[in-house]
Image: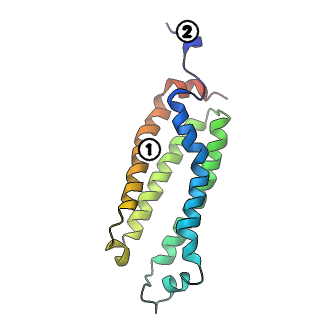
Amino acid sequence: MTDSVFEPRGIAGWLILPAIGIAFAPLGLLVSIAKDILPAFGDDVWPLLVNPGSPIYHPLWAPIIIFELVADIAMVIASLVVLVMFFRKSRHAPRVIVIWLAALLVVQIVDLLLTRQIPAVASQVEFDDFRDLLRSAVVAAIWIPYFLVSRRVKNTFTE
């Protein structure tokens, strides 16, 4: 028989690690958008990517870049929802966090698969892309099960 007084609860223990990640996620996603996506819309880059006469033109550039922008904006919005739900200790937070972590991984996989359809990109092995994908997969592999089975999570997210 366990006494509920001794049950783990609150944002403590291992739950501190995802709390830190969730707190900084919106900022990290915004920095990624500013650094990796928005420059492609510049006057000196966008015409080269979408003009069929350009030496670096490929018909997938525009849809992929727009997909990346829309997906990342959606992930920023989702991360803000996750942030609010997490720190309000909403009972729906664990499920939303699981969906968000899975969505982040899926978006990264889809983006990597799409960009590899462009020969100029496919010919370059970018270890950063695979490192980031591996990091996201490890994060999902650790924290999704944690949010699904942890007693601390069950006892903390009750509002």
Where residue 27 appears, x then y in whole percent? 61, 53
Q: Residue furthest top?
A: 1
Quarter of the figure that contains the C terminus = top right
Q: Secondary structure beneath disc 1?
A: helix
Where residue 56 appears, x then y in whole percent? 43, 84
Q: Residue furthest bottom?
A: 53
At horizontal 59% and vertical 29% (from top left) the residue drawn is 11
At horizontal 58% and vertical 71% (from top left) the residue drawn is 38
Q: Give the residue pinned by disc 1.
A: 139
Where residue 93 appears, x then y in whole percent? 60, 37
At horizontal 47% and vertical 58% (from top left) the residue drawn is 107
Residue 118 appears in the picture as rendered? no
Q: Where 63 sits versus 143, above or below? A: below
Q: Amino acid at mark 2?
A: Asp
Could you classify mark 1 by the number of other residues whose Cα lies within 10 Å: few (under 14), some (14-19), or many (20 or more)? some
Residue 3 numbered mark, or none: 2
